Image (spheres, grey):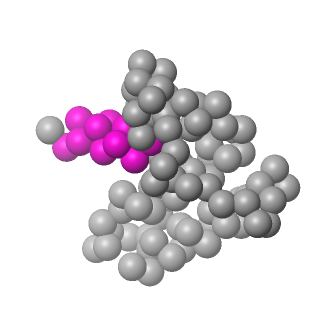
Amino acid sequence: MRGIRIVVAAAALMVTPALAADEVLQLSTMTCKQFVDAPKDSVGVILTWMMGYLQDSDEPAEINFTKMEDVGKKLKTYCDTNPSHALMTALDKVTDEDSK
């Protein structure tokens, strides 16, 4: 749980002026197209959040940038061919492939 808090805090610190203080990213309703079309800074924040979301509570608190880049590439590939799919569904699909 502490690891997730650290990742969320780091993501919050990475938010640039491109994301206004009152702006909310609704990841639960975001589509693949919205993710692919998002500004690079926003994609970075989203991917950082996803790494915390995917991290098991018993894993050490860390941000693996290589793994984050890999997940980002897989999401982009998936989302390019499935633009209407929900982003969180896409995340499940690309990370489920890794666990097989």
Q: Position of residue 76 (x, y in %)?
A: 49, 28
Please name the residue shown 76% across and 66% down the image.
22
Q: Is residue 77 above or below residue 52?
A: above
- Residue 48, quarter of picture: bottom right
- Residue 17, quarter of picture: bottom right
Does the magenta portion include 14?
A: no
Please name the residue shown 37% across and 38% down the image.
90
Q: Is residue 69 above or below residue 33?
A: below
Q: Give the magenta part as a residue range.
A: 87-99
Task: Name the magenta segment's main secondary structure.
Answer: helix
Q: Is residue 39 above or below residue 60?
A: above
Tell me if I can see residue 79 in this picture.
no
Q: Position of residue 85 (x, y in %)?
A: 40, 33
Report the side of 6 relative to 58 (left or right). right
- Location of the C terminus (image quadrant): top left
**Total number of numbered discs in the rendering:** 0
Does the magenta portion include 97?
A: yes
